[in-house]
Image: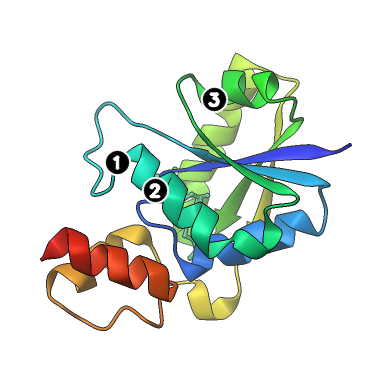
């Protein structure tokens, strides 16, 4: 069984993340969304809240999709979870430099775990969790960017 891990902050999950996850599910038998907890990065939602939003919004895929909160280095988690590849998304050329660095750093850490990149649908190429949080903060309409469950959670969090 081919298993991949899709690591990220998912703070919160957007239609862009979902687009990448669905593409990866066409290639792998099982996908594990790994919620990263960055000690230096301030997240709006707790890891458990982010996990819940992924599970609810991707409920149609839960027979082949699992959501796990990371406690360790991503490559180590990937191996522990029995996956061979990490999935990442590319929006635009601007993502490339950071992702290039990340892939090579991960290869130094563990050369057996490789990364696979999917390009998002063009309509999500501008979309990021940071943008969603900014629009949410100013009470903008988020329905075109995130699923309705996440819109509700954003409203609760920011009220
Ligand atoms: P990180 O903090 O690790 O960048 P994110 O949750 O922001 O985590 O993103 C996780 C992955 O999903 C990254 O590879 C990122 O490039 C990708 N991603 C995020 N938003 C989009 C989008 N709109 N389209 C395609 N890929 C995306």
| Residue 55 as seen in the image, left or right of residue 11 | right
Q: Residue visible at 71% across and 26% down?
A: 113
Q: Is residue 91 visible?
A: no
Report crowding for label 2: few under 14, some 14 to 19, many 20 or more residues within 10 A (C-alpha): many
Instruction: Pick the residue in front: 57 or 139.
Output: 57
Query: Which residue is the site of mark 2?
Result: 50
Q: Say whether disc 3 or disc 2 marks the residue closer to the N-terminus.
A: 2
Separation of marks 3 and 1 at Cα, in angstroms: 27 Å
Q: Is mark 3 within 8 Å of ligand 1?
A: no
* Secondary-structure class at tag 3: helix
* Secondary-structure class at tag 2: helix
Label 3 vs label 1, nearer the camera: 1
Query: Which residue is the site of mark 3?
Result: 105
Q: Residue visible at 61% across and 61% down?
A: 59
| Residue 100 as seen in the image, left or right of residue 24 | left
**Pointers 3 and 1 in contact (C-beta within 8 Å):** no
**Pointers 1 and 2 in contact (C-beta within 8 Å):** yes
Q: Give coordinates of residue 129: x percent, y percent.
A: 35, 59
Number of residue marks: 3
**Pointers 3 and 2 in contact (C-beta within 8 Å):** no
| Residue 132 as seen in the image, left or right of residue 75 | left
Q: Say whether disc 3 or disc 1 marks the residue closer to the N-terminus.
A: 1
Res 46 label? 1
Q: Is mark 2 within 8 Å of ligand 1?
A: no
């Amino acid at each position: 069984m081919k298993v991949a891990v899709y690591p990220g902050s998912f703070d919160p999950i957007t239609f862009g993340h979902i687009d990448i996850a669905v593409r990866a599910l066409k290639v792998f038998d099982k996908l594990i969304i790994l919620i990263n907890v960055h000690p230096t990065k301030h997240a709006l939602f707790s890891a458990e809240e982010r996990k819940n939003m992924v599970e609810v919004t991707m409920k149609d895929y839960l027979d082949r999709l699992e959501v796990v909160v990371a406690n360790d280095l991503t490559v180590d988690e990937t191996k522990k979870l029995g996956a061979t590849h990490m999935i990442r998304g590319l929006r635009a050329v601007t993502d490339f430099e950071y992702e290039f660095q990340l892939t090579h750093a991960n290869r130094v850490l563990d050369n057996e775990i490789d990364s696979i990149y999917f390009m998002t649908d063009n309509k999500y190429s501008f979309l990021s969790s940071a943008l969603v949080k900014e629009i949410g903060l100013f009470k903008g309409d988020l329905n075109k960017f995130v699923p309705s469950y996440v819109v509700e959670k954003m409203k609760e969090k920011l009220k």
